[in-house]
Image: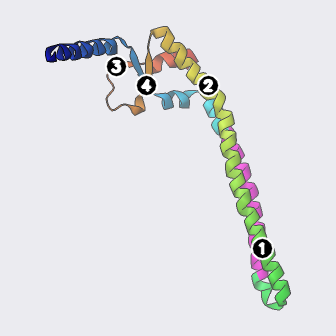
Amino acid sequence: MKKISVLFAVVMMLMTAGVANAQKIAALNYEEILSLMPETKKVTTDLDTFSKTKEAELKKLGDTFQAEVQKYQAEGAKLTEAQRTAKETELQKTQTNLQQMATTAQQDLMKRRETLLKPVLDKLNNAIEKAAKANGWDFIIDASALIYRGGTDATPAVKKELGI
């Protein structure tokens, strides 16, 4: 009985090795291809413009806030206690609003990035799928995830699919 189970284990290992060898695997440099796509360059430019616009708006509001703080510091001694309390409350509210605006701007930038990149990533993933089918690859793995890469490189085939 023991011999049969050992024989069965050996047969299963041989079959598993045979199936693994039958799989066609390729690697590609996903980031390289993504960076070479003209759409990615346009997305980067659009995001930079959007980011700079938001930064300029926040800087302008921040400068106005700083001027108000400096004015308060210079004239605070002349104000009554009630006026000082009211002005400090107003300044704290303004500061909170600025922080919320900065957070919202960051979130808007992330949403815009996702929205703009989705079609680019979809196009790249479709090209990878077409290249895999055309070349008979069962798996394509990102080369950055590999410790050793000695097999087929799918990068040129995907670049060809994309026309880059």
Find the distance from the CA under tag 1 to the CA under tag 4: 54 Å
Q: State which tag comes first along the sequence, 2 or 4.
A: 2
- Dot 4 amino acid type: Ile
In percent of width and height, residue 76 lies at 79, 86
Query: Would residue 157 be found to the left or right of residue 86 on screen?
Result: left
Find the distance from the CA under tag 2 to the CA under tag 4: 17 Å
- Dot 1 amino acid type: Leu
Residue 56 shown in magenta:
yes
Name the one closer to the observer, 152 or 104: 104
In percent of width and height, residue 2 lies at 15, 18
- Quarter occupied by the N terminus: top left
Q: Is residue 61 above or below residue 31?
A: below
| Extent of the magenta region | 46-72
In percent of width and height, residue 162 lies at 57, 18
Is the magenta region chiefly helix, strand or loop? helix
Q: Secondary structure at mark 4?
A: strand
Q: Residue at x 85, y 84 (%)?
A: 83
- Dot 3 amino acid type: Gly
Q: Secondary structure at mark 2?
A: helix
Query: How many labels were placed on the picture?
Result: 4
| Residue occupied by mark 1 | 91
- On residue 122, the disc is 2
Name the one closer to the observer, 29 or 22: 22
Q: State which tag comes first along the sequence, 3 or 1.
A: 1
The 10 Å Cα crowd at callout 1, few under 14, some 14 to 19, many 20 or more, is some
Find the distance from the CA under tag 3 to the CA under tag 4: 11 Å
